[in-house]
Image: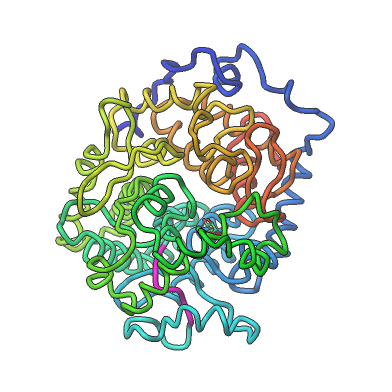
Amino acid sequence: MPSKEKTKNTDAAKSGSPLADRAAGTKKNDAALDPQAVTKPADLKTLATAVLRTNDHGTYTIPAANLYPHQWLWDSCFIAIGLRHLDPMRACQELRSLVRGQWANGMLPNMIFSDASEYNHDRNYWRSWINPNAPEGVATSGITQPPMFAEAVWQVGQVLPPTERRTWFREMFPVIVDYHSWLYDERDPHDEGLILLVHPWETGLDNTPPWMAELHEHNMPAWIKLVKTLRLDNIIGSLRRDHHYIPPGQRLSTIEILSLFDAQRRLRRKRYDTYSIIKRGLFSIEDLTFNSILLRANERLRQIADYLRRQIPDDLEANMALTPAALEKLWDEQTKQYYSRDFSTHRLLLQPSIAALMPLYAGVISPERAAQLVRGLENDKKFGAVFPVPSVPLDSPYFNPQLYWQGPSWVNTNWLIIDGLKRYGFDDHAAALIETTLDMVGRSGFAEYFDPVTGEPLGARDFSWTAALTIDLLKQSKGRKAD
Ligand code: GLC
């Protein structure tokens, strides 16, 4: 396993991007930074803690005020990974709050709605209660999000004393088994080892190019095309809630938002039943980021099972065993990259995105392929931005430094890449990316995302996973310990 390799991998540490230079120790990208503007580690930790406090709703943490008033699945996983350094019991609670939303079939929904009366509209829009598997008395969405849950459970477990850790793992083991079983049973209907997603919101990378290309080229509903032709989207756009808080150029276009809501309504019409959705839904894509995260989550599940000396059910174990080889089907020899794939035609969706780097985090690819991916990270025309890692390569026609998942750098994907770099022995690259990430946050605050060229803060401010993962990265940083 690459993770066991302890030799330092300097293969790809040549020159090119600021990250590569920093990893090779030849040059630093400090030129791009005003050292005065960078917050000191101790202050950064205090400020990050304050953000998490502000967004704390008692038993769970919202991603940010105003725009994100509910609990989100992978947000709370990242939040727990940071919170464990402040208050392990509260980190456990963060994840327990996700379990209250688990469906009887095992699904963990991407959103659990606040029960405040002002959010009636959101709850009614999803109407999770139309599916008999939805939990009683808790309103949720009807779709999932990247399966970070097992990783979060594992990471929180690491800071608990042995007895509490055992109790914690014992409590969470069946939750993970049920969730992963649901993924394979419902979302891998041909037993191919890859999970299919039915909505862009399930990717967590809402407007990522491969999905948006599918939408614009194949899946745009006729009525939305008409809205576009008649330019009604300008009028509809003026009513958007997110535009009250975030400049329109930093969010999805109104045509895309309408399409995502249309796709959601189709799922609701099918009562979120995967079998009927696959036949009639707008999207069915085997998403690269999601499946890479699942591979790692399966490994965490095995580690938890070993710790407890428990058996993973045979059918789940058999399904999990298919995924490493299945990931290799997503490799394209010509461009030397992995991609997402259309579920029914098996066509690779060749628009590059941050997903290309996620197999590092999965940890099951060969060291040669890992080195190939790292070259992309170093290349100043690809992912080697001044403030890495951009959510699409700099030379992509989709690249826009301010547009959500089509250019900006995000701290959660950086965290995943840092972990992947360490697994493959690229310790200098990992250390360099930790420092550039902390620099970026240190000068721009805990933004939702950042301009990879200027480091400017974008999207929501005081964003919880940015704060939580900053706390974790400060722990990982060799140079700047916060305490
Ligand atoms: C957006 C992001 C998604 C995140 C959610 C809440 O939808 O794309 O990844 O989970 O906001 O922060």
Magenta span dominant secondary structure: loop
Q: Quadrant of ligand 1?
A: bottom right
Q: Which picture quadrant has residue 21?
A: top right
Stretch of the chain drawn in magenta = 139-144
344, 60: nearer the viewer: 344
Quadrant showing the N terminus: top left
Q: Give 414 or 268, whichever is nearer the viewer.
A: 268
Residue 429 lies, with reference to residue 122, above or below; the image says: above
Residue located farthest toward the right when viewing the structure as drawn? 36
Q: Is residue 421 above or below residue 133?
A: above
The quarter of the image holding the C terminus is top right
Number of marks in picture = 0
Residue appearing at x 50%, y 56% in the figure: 156
From the viewer's perspective, tell me whether residue 290 is left or right of residue 92: left
**Residue at point 42%, 55% (across, down):** 203
Residue 113 in the magenta stretch? The answer is no
Q: Position of residue 183 (x, y in %)?
A: 28, 62
- The residue depicted at 71 percent of the width and 54 percent of the height is 461
Q: Is residue 29 above or below residue 219?
A: above
Nearer to us in this view, 136 or 168: 136
